[in-house]
Amino acid sequence: MSRVSVLVRILLAGSEGKTASAGWVDADEGCSGYGGMSRQERFELDCDYRRHLHQNLLPRYWDALVARYTLDPAERGQCIKGLARVVASHAHPHFKFYAVLTWAEPQRLGIDGKRSTGVLNTDIYDMNRWDDNRGTPERTRRHWRAKISETLHELLNEAIAAAERLLEEQELFSQEAA
């Protein structure tokens, strides 16, 4: 598994009951990582790593990782709100919130409600609704959305790098390779 896949598996450890979480844990089953630990022992260790990341990452890094990669709607919602507060933009708060929300949950192909339980309604992706009837020109709104998305992608990359450093300090990746 790649380092990002391991990081996602650790972030999903709080969602163990979910099918996707079990899939991420099981995806590593064929590897010799964790020194032959059982699935339950691996899950418990992932929970410990998750707690370590939460305690030691900058809050904006934690928010970016959770908003983008986890399954728990309540936890993701809090992190999305946190990101909307810290992202610098000339956009008004209502617009920023929707830009962050749609970055965290990108639009997927398919019919509403048929793809997954965590899918947003298609109208949420309509940028015209984000302006809150302020009459901001479309060009400005597109610029705001692009800058917010660029900022969030940069923040996510920084968060992944910081999380990988923390996990390296815990010697996780050397255990994975063993």
Image: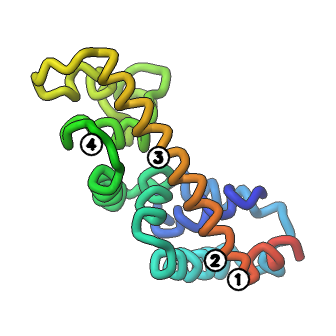
The image's mark for residue 166 is 2
Amino acid identity at mark 1: Glu
Tag 4 residue: 97
- Left or right of 107? Residue 135 is left
Is residue 13 or residue 145 the one in the foreground? Answer: 145
Is residue 88 or residue 51 the one in the foreground? Answer: 88
Residue 139: which quarter of the image? top left
Amino acid identity at mark 3: Leu
Q: CA distance from mark 4 to mark 2?
A: 29 Å
Q: Earlier in the sequence, mark 4 or mark 2?
A: 4
Q: Secondary structure at mark 2?
A: helix
The image's mark for residue 169 is 1
Classify 10 Å Cα crowding around label 1: few (below 14), some (14-19), many (20 and above): few
Is residue 52 or residue 71 the one in the foreground? Answer: 52
Is disc 4 in contact with disc 3, using a CB cutoff of under 8 Å? no
Q: CA distance from mark 1 to mark 3?
A: 25 Å
Residue 114: which quarter of the image? top left
Q: In the image, what residue occupies the spot 69% across and 84% down? A: 170
Is disc 1 in contact with disc 2, using a CB cutoff of under 8 Å? yes
- Protein image colouring: rainbow
| Residue 116 appears anywhere in the view | no
Q: In the image, what residue occupies the spot 60% across and 69% down? A: 163
